[in-house]
Structures are given as structure tokens and as C-alpha cells.
Image (cartoon, helix red, strand yellow):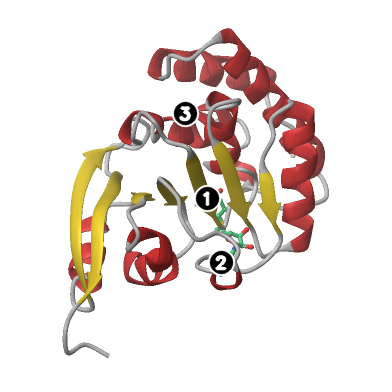
Amino acid sequence: MAVDPAARRADRAAAERLVHVSRETWARWEALVAALDKWQATTNLVAPTTLATVWTRHVADGAQLLPLAPQDCQTWVDLGSGGGFPGLVVAAALAGRTQVHLVESNLKKAAFLREAARAMDVAVTVHAARADAVLGSVVTRADVVSARALAPLADLVAMAAPLLKTGAVGLFPKGAKAEAELTAAAKSWNINASFHPSLTEPDARIVRVDGLAERRGVE
Ligand SMILES: C[S@@+](CC[C@H](N)C(=O)[O-])C[C@H]1O[C@@H](n2cnc3c(N)ncnc32)[C@H](O)[C@@H]1O
């Protein structure tokens, strides 16, 4: 699907108004978008209709998680990273400071994540596996666990529980049904969660989880 260069330029300018990061980070994001454009011809990494607005829909959308993370974040784990959102976006901004793990079960997408990270000159660890095969065994602790468009919140917190129960902050971009998803998740878990407005989508929210424990008496 050919992208209109003028639409792409206008969207990039819109993203620059939303996100303020170093020139080096923008350069790494340029490399990410170039890799995405190359691979998207053969691998469905993002919805084709969102390619013209990749800068706001995907890059700025991922970058808006950064101010919600603890400042001294040493380890960030992104689940179901797909085309690198938000995992590679945050890895570019935190390069040299934070160890970023990307967990992606689709082998082709995991190969993309490795190639894109190389092109961006960003060191990340890509786990080509399901989250349940990695969390609590290969990766046992983190400061942040994120996931976008992977699963409803109840399933997400269950998946991320090994990290959330040991002190990780959860950052989960969600749509207009964020509150209903939290209500459903709270049937099985004691969750300390807060909602944060999305910069990129008016109805969307980011759910930040600051504590998770099993509810007593719940299977
Ligand atoms: C809808 S895509 C979202 C991709 C990306 N996070 C985004 O927002 O653009 C969900 C991704 O999660 C991956 N996935 C699904 N279940 C998974 C699991 N249990 N562990 C790791 N990855 C998973 C899929 O292969 C897919 O790439």
C-alpha cells in the first residue's frame, strides 16, 4: 500500500508537537519507520490503513508511555511487541540506560524486531516465544511491563502477574472500554490501577498498574 508522502510529513509534524525527545531518538525512530515500511510489503506488522499516520498512531502513541514509567527504570519488558510498538519506540528513547526485552510469539515478527533494532543501533533482547514461557522463568523481574493491543486487561494482568506481583509497574494502552476492562479484571485480582489520558486518541486511556495481588478465594 503506497503511502502519500505529504500525509506522512504532516503526520510526522503532528508527532513532533506531541513528543519531545532528543535528535538521536528521532533518528532511531526514523530507522524504525524505514524498517517497518520495508517489511510491511511482505509481513503484516501494522494495519495498512495506519501507515500514513505511523508517527502519531504508533510512534507518539508508544512514546507517551515514557513519562508514566519510573525515572530510574532499569528493565522494561514489552509483551506482544509485533511491529515494535511500543517496545522499540521506548527502547530508542532509553538506549544505553534501560535493558529492554521484547516478547513476541510470531517468529517472523520477532525476526523483524531484531532487524529493526539493528538498523536503529539499539540493543534489545528479543524473545521469540509466548509471554508465559518467558515471564517468571527467563525474565524474573522488571521495573515496567507494557503491552498494547495484546489482550483484555484481565488476561494481560494474568500474563504479566509474575512481574507485576514483584514490583513492576504495568503500562497498558487501552481503548474507550478501559474502565469496563478494569472492572472485569478486579473480579480476580486486587489491582491498584490509575487511568491516564491518551495524547493520540481522544477516547483512549493508558492504564497504569502499581500493584497486583490475587484475590483470596478466587480460583
Ligand atoms: C495485535 S498485535 C499488537 C502488536 C503491537 N503491540 C502493536 O500494538 O502494534 C498482538 C501481537 O502479540 C503477539 N502475541 C499474541 N499472543 C502472544 C503471547 N501469548 N506472547 C507473546 N506474543 C503474543 C502476536 O503475534 C502479535 O504480534
Residue 164 at what x, y percent from top left? 35, 59
Residue situated furthest top in the rendering: 23
* Closer to the camera in the image, 77 or 45: 77
Residue at figure coordinates x 41%, y 60% from the top left: 163
Q: Is mark 2 within 8 Å of ligand 1?
A: yes
Q: Earlier in the sequence, mark 3 or mark 1?
A: 3
10 Å crowding of disc 3: few (<14), some (14-19), many (20+): many
In this rendering, is residue 8 above or below 180? above
Residue at figure coordinates x 35%, y 37% from the top left: 201
10 Å crowding of disc 2: few (<14), some (14-19), many (20+): some
Q: Is mark 1 within 8 Å of ligand 1?
A: yes
In this rendering, is residue 186 above or below 76? below
| Residue placed under numbered mark 2 in the picture | 131
Residue 67 at what x, y percent from top left? 34, 28
Alpha carbons under labels 3 and 1: distance apart: 16 Å
Write down the quadrant of residue 48 in the picture.
Answer: top right
Residue 139 visible in rendering: yes
Position of 23 compared to 28: left or right?
Answer: left
10 Å crowding of disc 1: few (<14), some (14-19), many (20+): many
Q: Secondary structure at mark 1?
A: strand
User: Which amino acid is tagged 2?
Assistant: Ala
Q: Secondary structure at mark 3?
A: helix
Residue 12 at what x, y percent from top left? 55, 18
Please report contact status of discs 3 and 1: CB closer than 8 Å, yes or no: no
- Specify the quarter for ligand 1: bottom right
* Closer to the camera in the image, 53 or 158: 158
Please report contact status of discs 3 and 2: CB closer than 8 Å, yes or no: no
User: Which amino acid is tagged 1?
Assistant: Asp
Alpha carbons under labels 3 and 2: distance apart: 25 Å
| Residue placed under numbered mark 1 in the picture | 78
